[in-house]
Amino acid sequence: MRFLPDSHAPSVTVVGFGYVGSCLGVTLAERGLRVTGVDSNRALVDELRDGRCPIPEPGLADAVARLAGSGRFTCTTGYEDAGATDVVVITVGTPVGPDHRIVTDQLEEACKRLATRLRRGQLVVVKSTVPPGTTRELVLPLLERSGLVAGRDFGLAYCPERLAQGSALRQLAELPVVVGGYDPESTAAAVQFWKQALDVPVQTLPGLETAEVVKLASNWWIDVNVALANELAQFCAPHGVDVLDVIAAANALPKGEGRVNILLPSVGVGGSCLTKDPWMAWRAAADRGIALETVETARRVNDAMPTRAGQLIADELAALGKAPAECTVAVLGVAFKSNTGDLRDTPVVGVVDALRATGAAVRLFDPLADPADVEARFGARPVASVEAAVSGVDAIAILAGHQEFHRLDFARLRAEVAMPCLIFDGRMYYPPDTIADLTSLGYRYRGVGR
Ligand SMILES: NC(=O)c1ccc[n+]([C@@H]2O[C@H](COP(=O)([O-])OP(=O)(O)OC[C@H]3O[C@@H](n4cnc5c(N)ncnc54)[C@H](O)[C@@H]3O)[C@@H](O)[C@H]2O)c1
């Protein structure tokens, strides 16, 4: 195969060893490949070299510690080794600017530096999320500054990363990889690489642009679907209808090749992808005179949820006869979703802001998030335990459904809180028997659309 060695397992450079790069690079090294992580963040590289991983993903820090001294994993700020490995995977950040247009600084810098090291026979795979045309019109010419020609001297493919934070390491071992190559040889090399490296199914697409759009389409669909769930929740609540009953029954309906599949409502959509990828598609479409109205609507609906949730908590406190301004609310879980410590664009900031606007005091606890990061984003230092969070509070708002919170003993906590206490269920999706238990213990229960 022209762009992949036949005689040995491919060695890999992962450029951009942040969230995605670390999860991928560490997974590849654990599967026996020799991996070099390149990242411009010196502090991150130093930590990884010492066998520590500051990136909050379950299992990642343990894997980094296991790999220390294995000889299969090195990390550096320089691109020297990039020319020595068989495959280079690019996973640098691709944020959007205030006009929702992709900011390509990281990608451009990575390609320019890679071009100084690129050698004949290498396969370059772009994984960062980009609008259609970026790999062909931006990445390719920058790489060809090397004097080498794509498709002839080096392979080039776009393979979007689709892992979900919180279960990234498991997903990397299971999710099908989508491959769109620049030419048939690049596609064939990328397909073989992912099969060999991760032993997962591979979906081959007609070209670079198709694969680029697949990633944007997935996140656009998720955001629109969650917006539907969030509006459905608002629709159900005044009718005394539990939105989860509706979703479960609606989702049993066969439709097309699958079934109706309404996702779950929550206190909002956050993270570094769902809040920007739909806008990235919207901007790319707008640049061609196409208006993606579902993107605008879904973003507006989901962005309104944190304030709505904060107000809902205040209303429920008032219904308990407690003035919100005299109440303390324990917020359990401040990350942008369950089972991750990632605080990027967490909707919990909006919930806390809305609560503070009512005059309520807020106490924060998250077992997975970095306390300094919490303090920087929320302007308050988190407490160190559930017990410290709930002592004397009028409401417990569980806003990220971390595993640890499934072990909460509400019968025991009853003595710690100021009864009657509100349990606000932002992402736990408690079943009816748990809700009945909470009610019989004297708590008031409220969820999103329930
Ligand atoms: N976070 C997710 O769950 C997720 C999921 C799927 C896809 N993605 C996409 O993957 C890409 C990476 O996302 P992320 O969350 O890992 O971002 P991140 O910010 O965590 O990581 C990017 C890393 O690239 C490094 N970097 C920047 N410029 C560099 C350069 N020129 N050379 C070397 N390193 C450089 C940064 O220091 C940083 O550590 C983005 O395009 C994102 O949209 C993210």
Image: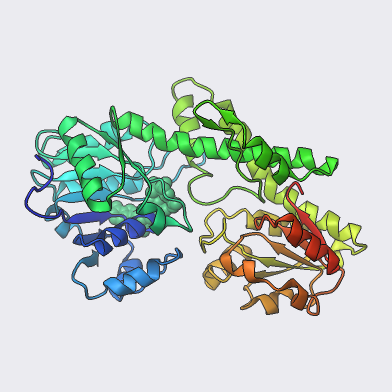
Residue 356 in view (yes/no): no
Is 53 situated left or right of 385 in this image? left
Dividing the image into 4 quarters, which one contains the N terminus?
Answer: top left
Is 52 situated left or right of 297 in this image? left
Q: Where is residue 164 in the image (x, y as percent from the top left)?
A: 46, 51
Q: Position of residue 137 (x, y in %)?
A: 28, 31
Q: Which quadrant of the view contains residue 12?
A: bottom left
Residue 295 in view (yes/no): yes
Q: Which colour scheme is used?
A: rainbow
Q: Camera-side residue: 403 or 81?
A: 403
Q: Which quadrant of the view contains residue 233?
A: top right
The residue lying furthest to the right in this view is 321
| Residue lying at 48% horizontally and 58% vertically, measured from the top left | 166
| Residue lying at 53% horizontally and 68% vertically, measured from the top left | 368
Is 18 situated left or right of 448 in this image? left
Q: Position of residue 394 (x, y in %)?
A: 82, 69
Is 380 situated left or right of 86 in this image? right
- Against 214, is 177 above or below? below
Q: Camera-side residue: 308 or 104?
A: 308
Q: Where is residue 59 in the image (x, y as percent from the top left)?
A: 41, 67
- Against 97, is 314 above or below? below
